[in-house]
Image: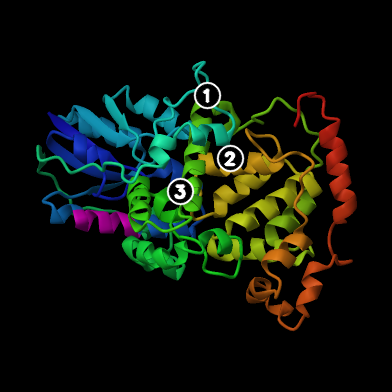
Amino acid sequence: MKQIIWFRRDLRIEDSAILHYANGEVLPIFIFDSNILSKLRYDDKRVSFIYKSVLLLKKKLQKINLDLAIYYGEPIEIFKNLKKIGFEKILCSVDFDSYSKNRDKEIEKILPISRYIDSFLLNPKEHLKKNCTPYVMFTPYYNSLSLISQSNHIEEYQVSKKIKLYKYDYTNAPNLEQMNFIEQNLPSFLSEDVYTLLENFKDILQNYSKNRDFFSKNGTSNLSVHLRFGIISVKQVFNYIKSLHVKNSDVFIRQLFWREFYNYLLYHFPHSEFENFKDININWRNNKQEFKMWCEGRTGIYIIDAAMQHLNKTGLMHNRLRMIVASFLTKNLLIDWRWGEKYFAEKLLDYETSTNIGSWQWAASTGADSVPYFRIFNPYTQSQKFDKDGTFIKNIIPESKNIESKLFHIESINAIIDIKSSRQRAINIFKYSKNSNIT
């Protein structure tokens, strides 16, 4: 049987389900999907990262006597042509966002598809409550998985010995310019080998629970982009962390399972990609000018502005900063979480549909297991606690270098909104929402 091994967001040969389950003559491919790329800016950093990662995947495949055919175009047309030359089946990882599901549904009319859970640890179809309904609270979900989360090792996939490379012209590949993109400079850590990042994290892990919330400290793993595009698998990260036997490493493992939980929710509640998870109707203000100022980092609140300017320049944002700016947008400015989610989708290097939607709905108090509506982050308190000396702010906003740090944490007359009064306004609006079961 001639099979197509379709790499998507699993750009690796290690712990690869599709390389494990393939059998017979295979054509490994990657498609730069024009339906997706046509919606991106010419300077989108993610495309540069993916392009480099795809070329690296090609080299790794060649070392195990395989190769990679690289396409640019509409997947449906590409598979129509591949069917004509005798291919009978497609193997790929599975995604649960609406575009992926609709795309795969159409492609399956051309060729049968075998899908594998390869971007996550768990199959969201499984791990239900005793009454066979899905969990909607993280802690019970996480506790139900203790046999997995507390294990020391999860078996990884090995490359099949029953595959043979299909004879094909593997030399043709589009370059960035042909796809209407310009190569971008990437943050330095994205040029590092992913296993080097893991090794570096080994020294950070000991103090991860204490340092991960401080914006200017190197206290996180720097692996989110690599996990998003499958340069490394979640199992590989899990197994590496477990092998270290570092005290308090469970704090990091728990974060991996939050990622699983958001994917689980998207699978069971697909409406949450576009609608409030909870059946509530919020009277959003949706002031376009205020949204524009938030996007550009011109709110007059130093920590908000530094976070957004850093995002716009680098495509990166610390997790606590994401919570702070999301709380400010949805609660203080009362702007629909979908506006913020869409903006993050355009900017974040590690953008992942399920995690981004879940996180935004968490902050907006519209999602599963979300923050209570009356819990609203005070940006001044947050900057005082996690950037007391203003190190992060001064690194991002040049004109702030000579400002006394304590002023960053005091409400300014230049801020676009008063924190105390806007907080109370949000509480009133959420409290008197038409839905009576809001929590």
Circle 2 packing at 10 Å, graded few (<14), some (14-19), many (20+), is many
Q: Is residue 18 above or below residue 324?
A: above
State the SS at label 3.
helix
Q: Please state which of residues 176 and 184 is positioned toward the viewer in this rendering.
A: 184
Q: Name, please, the residue furthest toward the top.
A: 131
**In the image, is residue 56 part of the stretch drawn in magenta?**
yes
Q: Name, please, the residue furthest toward the bottom.
A: 402
The three-letter code of the residue at mark 2 reads Ile
Q: Please state which of residues 376 and 31 is positioned toward the viewer in this rendering.
A: 376
Q: Looking at the image, is mark 3 or mark 1 nearer the viewer?
A: 3
Chain-order first, disc 1 or disc 2: 1
Residue tagged 2: 357
Segment colored magenta: 52-60
Marking on residue 253 = 3
Circle 3 packing at 10 Å, graded few (<14), some (14-19), many (20+), is some
Chain-order first, disc 3 or disc 1: 1
Marking on residue 192 = none
Query: Could you tell me how far apart the alpha carbons at marks 1 and 2 are, in whole angstroms?
Result: 18 Å
Looking at the image, which residue is at 44% across and 66% down? 184
> Decide: marks 1, 2 in contact (CB < 8 A)?
no
Residue 244, quarter of the rendered image: bottom left
Q: Position of residue 167 (x, y in %)?
A: 9, 43
Looking at the image, which residue is at 41% across and 50% down? 227
Looking at the image, which residue is at 49% across and 29% down? 267
The three-letter code of the residue at mark 3 reads Ile
Q: Is residue 235 left or right of residue 100?
A: left
Chain-order first, disc 3 or disc 2: 3
